[in-house]
Image: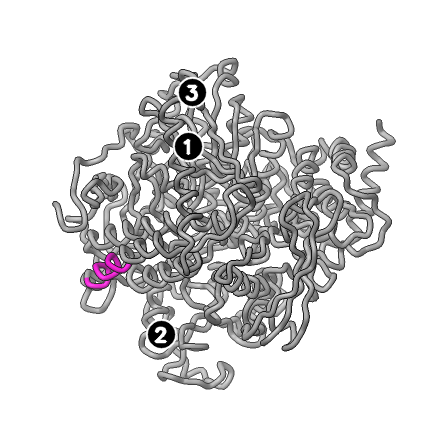
Amino acid sequence: MTTDFWTEGEPVVDKAAPDGPVETRWERRKFNAKLVNPANRRKLTVIIVGTGLAGGSAAATLAEAGYQVKSYCYQDSPRRAHSIAAQGGINAAKNYRNDGDSVYRLFYDTVKGGDFRARESNVYRLAQVSVNIIDQCVAQGVPFAREYGGLLDNRSFGGTQVSRTFYARGQTGQQLLLGAYQALERQIGLGNVEMNARHEMLELIIVDGKARGIVVRDMVTGEISTEFADAVVLASGGYGNVFFLSTNAKGCNVTASWRAHRKGALFANPCYTQIHPTCIPESGSHQSKLTLMSESLRNDGRVWVPKAQKDTRRAADIPEDERDYYLERIYPSFGNLVPRDIASRAAKNVCDEGRGVGPGGLGVYLDFADAINRLGRKAVEAKYGNLFEMYERITGEDPYETPMRIYPAVHYTMGGLWVDYDLQSTIPGLFVVGEANFSDHGANRLGASALMQGLADGYFVLPNTISNYLAAGPFPKVTASDAPVVEARKQVEDRIEKFLSINGDRTVDSFHRELGQIMWEYCGMERSEEGLTKAIGLIRALKEEFWTRVKVPGKGEELNQNLEKAGRVADFIELGELMCIDALHRRESCGGHFRAESQTPDGEALRHDDEFSYAAAWEYFGADGRPTLHKEDLNFEYVHPSTRSYK
Amino acid sequence: MDIKVRVWRQSGPSAGGKMVTYDVKGISPDASFLEMIDVLNETLILNGDDPIAFDHDCREGICGACSMVINGVAHGPEKATTTCQLHMRKFSDGDVIDVEPWRAAAFPVIKDLVVDRSAFDKIIQAGGYITVPTGTAPDAHATPVPKKDADAAFEAATCIGCGACVAACPNGSSMLFTAAKITHLGLMPQGQPERDSRVIDMLQAQDDAGFGGCTNAGECTTVCPKGIPLSLIGRLNSDYRKAITKR
């Protein structure tokens, strides 16, 4: 199908996918993968971009295995990657609670939670290795929450009916990342990893059709250098900052992925973004980011709004029978623990009805009064103390006394570079792990599954699959004077020069904010053909304006934070257009993506499996300005597509 | 709110620096301190001035990137709070606020408020880990850990590596940072085999990196955004004494 906005090309096929019973696919893939003997590993170099859970664990593991690893991160230390901010927990099918959990159930929940838009083989593998992750982390000394008997504690999380989430108070991401970081630092100390902090990848180098290196900028001196390897791994995270306001760290960006996309890597399901239901609402035009309150709060907090519209009474003054605990009312069997997409959209709906609370009516209450009565303040404090403190610091309100106000915000992106079962992109030698790939979450990710996927990819999957590729190496030596290297370097230098020479009258942030508003309005929780078409026009105009009016102060050869931002925002603008095109082409509601034209009579999401049961992998905008769609058909042999019902 | 900020401006590692005063008008009390600097920077850029460089990332108090000495106090006036979590409602209309970088021999200034904290990574490299190659771990329940130990280890492990402790210390010492890691790993049964070598090697690394010695001034714990207590330094010293006598 060809339209004004895209053309359709050949389907994309996952050639690495094993067949046979799902339970043994990973075992067989590992057995059939070529190995590299230990003596040869030190002749092979791997570049890894990003040091979060996926990149940090991959770098440590590959270095341990004997490969030469070069690691890059934009932060001043690998310990600061944004995985650090994940709060709630990490899932694993340990069944330590004896509540009927199993690898199969975690697999089932994840495929269903992803609204039948993920690959069964990948998800099954994820569930299988989940148990090894917990073992690994405990051995590293990660201080998970424990019970009085000394064994690990678990909690339940949205979208599931078992307790399989391991946690370290509200700082699980921090503790897991520090585990990976410490393993990485050990390898750095041993000389097995060359660590390059405050370095940003600005281009991918492809030689003879293979990913062979990257062009990086030293963010302190501004020096541009070319770095070579036998394989390149992107672990550069998600692209939620395309919305300007998101729960991502300020530095999170799509540039590494987008540069690879421009060089030929397909970008899959870009419109699949997750809107997290429990974030602290915006307080004004100065707002630079949004802060998430862990979803685990929904275990004990009850979500409600006043029954009446425009009710401006204080929460405490609204009597019980004038409150609408709408999640418990609409979804009696899951109640406050419905999956994220459902909780987010329900919050938007009640606010659209004029029943929202707080400034601008963009908020709903998350109330702990019942939990405090039932469990006591001390127990609530032990579970959520740091989250309550964080809330109070930001809003100036005490959640032990007044219910929290929450509102949905962009939190995670399920889309990303297309990868096969081996986590290899469509460019040979370019592997993508963690949130940066389009991964295992389909159209919606369940809570506590991001940490699981990041560590699964980094510790257990990539180290087993990349050997199959590296076994053919070492590849012919690449030098700085090779034509593709010279060209890639020149692209970076020309672009920097262009940013610095425009000298317009608008700041980079002003463009970023405007892009974010367009994306939130038209490509956020609810999308329509009319809105998306309008958004594409607005983004194209914004792009033109950016390249003529942006003002980037300073020079290239110094620490220049606005120059860094300019490159990231330029890439976000292009990505934003692709996201809208992807959202436009998918004329169905699924997962976190609600399409206004596709709903049931009672306003629930309506999926169209007959037409859209595929991953949409996009090729970069061609000469005619249109991206090409390559479909990967999804087959469900085990978990048969059904309408998700949490009622 | 209308305020003035006096900010340390330094164009590069070897350049001299000075405090420069800026007016910030009409800032919302709900803005964070960093958002106030964002707003100021937007004005500076449009006026053709060089915006203020500062480290920041997660802006939710956990990554440890932000690092400003505000009115002489690392991370500013609010207890147990990082700069990014400090809000303008803690200040008053008309205030003049001083903003400086971390100042310590081991944390050289790169530009304006940005410093080089890679010395912290060097300390971790020296022993701030448990050696466990991927895939070799026994079942997670093989070794129970008493809840009180696990909880105490967690408290120590909440250190975000921001370096406020060093910035506040009159000696520029990193003892609280090192002690937090020694305590975290030393409380876990998994951390026992390397306990002695860890403390010796990490202390050597912090000396090599140019951090000063500890004189129990206690400034570190006062500014620590995670409230890491001074008692952990006592624990470190105890571990060190035991380790060194076994040698």
User: 10 Å neighbourhood of mark 3: few (<14), some, or many (≥20)?
Assistant: some
In screen coordinates, is B66 left or right of A443?
right
Say above or below: A360 vs A605: below
Badge 2 marks a residue whose secondary structure is: helix
Q: Which element type, helix, strand or loop, lies under badge 1?
A: helix
Quarter of the view holding residue B182: top right
Q: Is residue B121 above or below residue A554?
A: above
Magenta region, main secondary structure: helix
In the displayed structure image, the side of residue A242 where residue A58 appears, left or right: right
A643 or B129, which is in the foreground? B129
Residue linked to disc 2: A351
Disc 1 marks a residue whose amino acid type is: Arg
Residue A251 is situated, as x and y percent measured from the top left of the image, at 49, 50
Residue type at mark 2? Cys
- Distance from Cα at disc 1 to Cα at disc 2: 49 Å
- Please report the bounds of the magenta region as a residue range: A530-538
Residue at which label 1 appears = A489
